Each structure stands twice: as C-alpha cells, then as structure tokens.
Image (tube, rainbow, N blue to C red):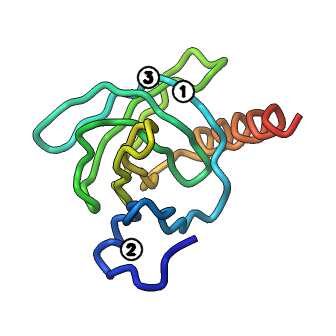
Amino acid sequence: MARVSMQADEVRRGGVIDGEVELDRRRSTRAPMTVRIDYATVDEMFSEFTRDINEGGLFIETEKPREPGTEVTMQFSLPGTADALKTTGRVVRVTPSVNGKPGGMGIEFDELTPDDRRKIDEIVRELRTRCEA
C-alpha cells in the first residue's frame, strides 16, 4: 500500500512517510526468520539480525542502513543447516524505525547457487507453513 502523493525518491527508498505504510514491491511474501547475519560493504563490516526472508531477498534490522543501491556481501546460516550461506546482494529499500518496530534495509539477492536457492525455498515454505498453522 502506498500513498499516491509519495515522491519518487521516497518510493525508491520504500520508507514510511508521515506514518503511512511503505510501498511493498516484493514478488513473494517474506517468512519471519531471525538469524545472525554478517555482511560487508566495500569499506565496512557489520553483524546484525535478519527479520524475514523470501526467495528473492531478506530484511536486516539495523540502526545504520546503507543507501539503496549499495552492494553487500553476506554470510548467514539457515535454521537446521550447518554450513553458512554466502552471497551478494543490493540494498533495495530502507525503512525507518516506526512505533517501536526496528528499522533496517531490504536486500535483494544478486547471486545464489542453485543449491542455496533450493535451501532458502525449502526453509521459506516451512516457515510460512508454521505461520499459517
């Protein structure tokens, strides 16, 4: 849902304007998933937590989101797996903290191996099933 009067830069950021809900351009619904994620930009490294994930990307809760378009390398473990998933992605939206809900940034995956994509798809389906039950 988006306000018709949103300015172009606000739409690109996908932020909340005047307390209204942000524009949501995801292709699939995200499933809630909280895991530690280590990620890096060209000049900095971070360790935060994810809020949710889908086949195309994830959301990282952070008080210091990177600018939209920033490339990040990421490493995280999916629940029930021992090996860390390593991939790259791009910041596609930044969301401020609102009503006590932490802000952060939406990351779209750039590269995933077929095996990693399958693992994410399986865990997302399992998490969605749990949420619907």
Q: Are marks 2 and 1 in contact (CB under 8 Å)?
A: no
- The picture places residue 25, in percent across and down from the top left corner, at 54, 68
Q: Quadrant of residue 7?
A: bottom left
Q: Residue furthest bottom?
A: 5
Name the disc covering residue 34, or none: 1
Please give the name of the residue rendered at 47% of the width and 64% of the height, measured from the top-left corner.
Answer: 20
For the residues bearing labels 3 and 1, Cβ distance under 8 angstroms: no
Label 1 element class: loop
Q: Nearer the viewer's eye, disc 2 or disc 3?
A: 2
Q: Position of residue 8 (x, y in %)?
A: 32, 81
Residue at the spot x=45%, y=27% of the render? Answer: 76
Q: Secondary structure at mark 2?
A: helix
**Residue 11 shows which numbered tag?**
2
Residue 89 vs 76, above or below: the answer is below
Secondary-structure class at tag 3: strand
- Sequence-wise, which precedes: disc 2 or disc 3? 2
Q: Is residue 58 left or right of residue 15?
A: right
Q: Is residue 94 left or right of residue 25?
A: left
18 sits to left or right of 121: left
| Residue 15 disc label | none
Q: Which is closer to the viewer, label 2 or label 1?
A: 2
Q: Amino acid at mark 2?
A: Val
Which residue lies at the image location 57% right of the left edge and 63% below the top edge? 26
Q: Nearer the viewer, residue 101 or 19?
A: 19
Viewport quadrant of the C terminus: top right
Single out the residue that lies furthest toward the top.
Answer: 82
Which quadrant holds residue 45?
top left
Q: How many marks?
A: 3
Q: CA distance from mark 2 to mark 1?
A: 26 Å
Q: Is residue 120 above or below residue 85?
A: below
State the residue position of label 3: 36
Disc 2 to disc 3, how far (Cα)?
28 Å
